[in-house]
Image (spheres, helix red, strand yellow):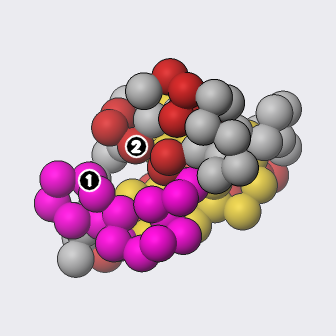
Amino acid sequence: MPQVLTANRLSDGEVVYLAPDGAWVESIAGAQILTTAEEGEAALAKGVEAERNQILVHAYLFDVAPDRRPVKMREIIRAAGPTVRRDLGKQAAA
């Protein structure tokens, strides 16, 4: 199953995703889709390096559908933003 690498940015706590160019983006739409174990391991190594450099915390891979939709509820909520107020975060931007 395809995967995406996610983490939280330390400077503001925002959920971020690893993009194909190696940048960390706030939208899952810009995330790199990892389709092999080797791609997943390489991406996770980038996450561990960013943790070492105190840019991110808790980098991990999660499963997505081929169109980047998260499979599990936890990741659906993280991709959409805070659930307590729809006028804040990613929900407000949409």
Residue at 77% in and 55% down: 57
Residue 60 appears left or right of 66: right
Quadrant (top left/top right/bottom left/bottom right) for the N terminus: bottom left
Residue 66 seen anywhere in this rendered image of the structure: yes
In the structure shown, which secondary structural element does the residue marked by tag 1 occupy?
loop
Question: Pointer 2: what residue?
Answer: 28
Residue at 54% in and 70% down: 74
Question: Pointer 1: what residue?
Answer: 68
Q: How many marks?
A: 2
Q: What is the x, y in percent for residue 12?
A: 81, 33
Q: Residues within 10 Å of mark 2 (few under 14, many from 20)?
A: many
Residue 24 in which image quadrant: top right
* Residue extending furthest toward the top: 93
Which circle's residue, 1 or 2, is located before the other in the chain? 2
Residue 47 in which image quadrant: bottom right
Quadrant (top left/top right/bottom left/bottom right) for the C terminus: top left
Q: What is the x, y in percent for residue 31?
A: 37, 42
The verdict on residue 16 being magenta is no
Mark 1 and mark 2: span between their CA atoms? 7 Å
Residue at 15% in and 60% down: 66
Amino acid type of disc 2?
Ile
Q: Are marks 1 and 2 in contact (CB under 8 Å)?
A: yes
Residue 43 appears left or right of 59: left
Q: What is the x, y in percent for residue 20?
A: 33, 37
Residue at 35% in and 63% down: 70
For the residue pair 6 and 82, the one nearer the viewer reads as 82
In the structure shown, which secondary structural element does the residue marked by tag 2 occupy?
helix
Q: Which residues are magenta?
A: 63-78
Q: Residues within 10 Å of mark 1 (few under 14, many from 20)?
A: some
Amino acid type of disc 1?
Arg
